[in-house]
Amino acid sequence: MSTSRPPEPGGASLDETDRLVLAQLGRDGRASYAEIGLLVNLSATAVRRRIDRLRARGVVRGFTVVLDPALLGWQTEAFVEVYCRERTAPEEILASLRQFPEVVAAWTVTGDPDALVHLRASDTGHLEAVIERIRKEPGVQRSRSSVVLSRLIG
């Protein structure tokens, strides 16, 4: 019986140590190379080399801060459909949305809108201001918003 894994998407071919390093980064993106090394049985230098290789190959695309909306007092949520001008590339949409800490997640989607954006804000005034700033971004033609009243699942 073979226990080999199927090939990684895009031919990434990660070994078990790569997976362990990535799992540690996923738990704590600010962990030092030495901390990760202790957990995966590598030196800090070896961890740095692996992470540098994973970044160069595009497996690791960057590091980010995940904010806790409740601790920020951001209890108001909305989903915003973003409609862009013709030929607005997903990379342009991403670059525009990355500047807003209120953006929890964003996706390109099928159908009429070009993107679906999940926002969190302190109140409806804050939410309105963020949506207006998004609508002023280059490439954005219009938007349509749905404010969350209550969470049923999740």
Image (cartoon, helix red, strand yellow):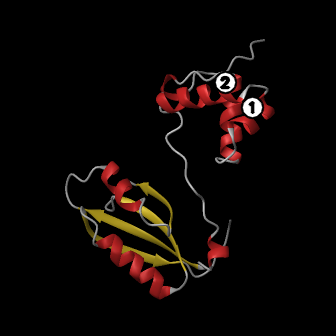
Q: Quadrant of the N terminus?
A: top right
Q: In this view, does 41 lie to the left or right of 103?
A: right
Q: What element carries label 2?
A: helix
The residue at the point 50 percent across, 22 percent down is 11
Q: In this view, does 80 lie to the left or right of 44?
A: left
Q: Is residue 103 above or below residue 77?
A: above
Amino acid carrying label 2: it is Ala
The residue at the point 52 percent across, 33 percent down is 59
Q: In this view, does 152 lie to the left or right of 100?
A: right
Residue 85 percent location from the top left of the image: 21, 61
**Tag 2 near tag 1, CB within 8 Å:** yes
Foreground residue among 102 and 84: 102
The residue at the point 68 percent across, 30 percent down is 19
Foreground residue among 70 and 2: 70
**Residue 135 seen:** yes
Amino acid carrying label 1: it is Gly
Q: Is mark 1 on a helix, strand or loop?
A: helix
User: In the rendered structure, which disc, 2 or 1, sits on the residue that comes first in sequence?
Assistant: 1
Residue 111 percent location from the top left of the image: 34, 58
* Crowd tier of the residue under label 1, counting other residues whose Cα lies within 10 Å: few below 14, some 14–19, many 20 or above: some
Quarter location, residue 21:
top right
Residue extending farthest to the top is: 1
Residue where numbered disc 1 is placed: 37
Residue 82 percent location from the top left of the image: 34, 66
Residue where numbered disc 2 is placed: 46
- State how many labels appear: 2
Q: In this view, does 6 lie above or below 92?
A: above
The residue at the point 36 percent across, 74 percent down is 144
